[in-house]
Amino acid sequence: MPRIVVAPHLRHHVDFPSQQVAGRTVGEALHAAFAIAPRLRGYVLDDQGRLRQHVFVFVDGRRVRDRDTLADPVGDNNEVQLFQALTGG
């Protein structure tokens, strides 16, 4: 099962320790994570179910391509990392 890792800044808002979840796509893995921590959904997805503009998801260090349907594949040994981009000066 893929492992979901939430970056510390985002974890400051929603407590989600790194853990393995079921899923064969980024979307399936994220929905499994949302079942564990429902508040995480609001920080990651917009009201259309797409990644929020300032959220980035990587699978083993590669940025996901499909920000709309989250169909990028994940395998049992993959790590899915969630980051919230920080802006400002």
Image: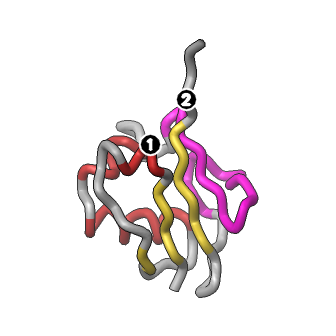
The residue pinned by badge 1 equals 9
The residue pinned by badge 2 equals 86
Where residue 85 appears, as percent x and y from the top left, is 57, 34
Identify which residue is drawn at 37% across, 66% down. Answer: 17
Residue 13 belongs to magenta span = no
Identify which residue is drawn at 47% across, 70% down. Answer: 29
Q: How crowded is mark 1: few (under 14 residues within 10 Å), some or many (20 or more)?
A: few
Question: What is the image's colouring?
Answer: secondary structure
Task: Check the image and name the residue furthest to the right.
Answer: 62
Which residues fall within the magenta stretch?
Answer: 52-71
| Quadrant holding the C terminus | top right
- Which quarter of the figure has residue 10? top left
Amino acid type of the residue tagged 1 in the rendering: His
Amino acid type of the residue tagged 2 in the rendering: Leu
Identify which residue is drawn at 59% across, 87% down. Answer: 76
**26, above or below 1, in the image:** above
Where residue 1 appears, as percent x and y from the top left, is 51, 86
Query: Main structural element of the magenta stretch: helix, strand or loop?
Result: loop
Identify which residue is drawn at 53% across, 40% down. Answer: 55
Where residue 47 appears, as percent x and y from the top left, is 35, 37
From the viewer's perspective, tell me whether residue 60 is left or right of residue 15: right
Q: Residues within 10 Å of mark 2 (few under 14, many from 20)?
A: few
Q: Nearer the viewer, residue 73 or 2?
A: 2
From the viewer's perspective, tell me whether residue 37 is left or right of residue 89: left
Where residue 77 appears, as percent x and y from the top left, is 63, 85
Residue 57 belongs to magenta span = yes
Quick check: marks 2 and 1 in contact, CB under 8 Å? yes
SS for callout 2? loop
